[in-house]
Image: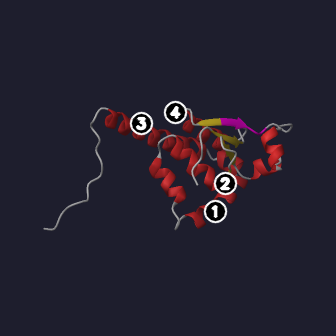
Amino acid sequence: MTAVWPLAIYYDASCPLCREEMHALKAYDGEHRLALVDASAPDFSDPDLAAAGIGREALMRLIHARDAAGQWFIGVAVFEQAYGAVGLHRVAALWANPRLRPLWNRVYPWVARLRQPLSWLHLNRAYGWLVRRAAARAQRQAQACAQGRCELPGPGPGPP
């Protein structure tokens, strides 16, 4: 399922790991496909969430997103859509990979539950750096293609 832009991502901005990742993605959102919504305030409320019966507790447990057509994405599906939205198609494909998806679906809730302690270990800085690096590379490739200099991976070496 593909999102209809813009995609409103409800995330925990009080979490350094979450904030780093979302802001790194938003920095490369040249098409304005992502709208970040800080759901960390204890009194946070949103009419779209209320209409869908989603409470703040659910948002703090797993990341949620709503697209312009009203489709909801939860957990790993949010990352798949968000990375694709900013042109990080290879990373989005990793999140969407049918063989890896069961692993991501098991690991992500654990990471979400431990996101604050993981941030204390400064993993947010490393992850943010990786996201920014991948986004900058994708942006360079897109600019090269726009200038008619696309370099697509070839089929590999031929027979000897």
Stretch in magenta: 36-40
Left/right of residue 153 with respect to residue 131 in the rendered view:
left
Contact flag, marks 1 and 3 (Cβ < 8 Å): no
- Badge 4 or badge 1: first in the primary sequence: 4
Tell me, what colour scheme is on the image?
A: secondary structure
Q: Amino acid at mark 4?
A: Glu
* Residue type, mark 2 in image: Gly
Q: Residues within 10 Å of mark 2 (few under 14, many from 20)?
A: some
Seen in the image, is 22 located left or right of residue 129?
right
Q: Residues within 10 Å of mark 3 (few under 14, many from 20)?
A: some
Query: Can residue 151 be found in the magenta stretch?
Result: no
Asked which secondary structure carries label 3, the reply is helix
The residue at which mark 2 appears reads as: 75
Q: Which callout, 1 or 2, points at the residue further toward the start of the chain?
A: 2
Q: Is residue 35 above or below residue 61?
A: above
**Percent position of residue 100, x then y:** 53, 65
Note whether 148 is above or below 84 in the view shown: above
As drawn, the label of residue 139 is: 3
Q: Residue at x 65, y 40 (%)?
A: 68
As for residue 37 lying within the magenta part, the answer is: yes
Choose the circle earlier in sequence order: 1 or 3: 1
Q: Earlier in the sequence, mark 4 or mark 2?
A: 4
**Badge 4 is on which residue?**
31
Q: Secondary structure at mark 4?
A: loop
**Marker disc for residue 25:** none
- Tell me the kind of residue under disc 3: Gln
Front in this rendered view, residue 71 or 137: 71
Mark 1 to mark 2: distance in Å? 8 Å
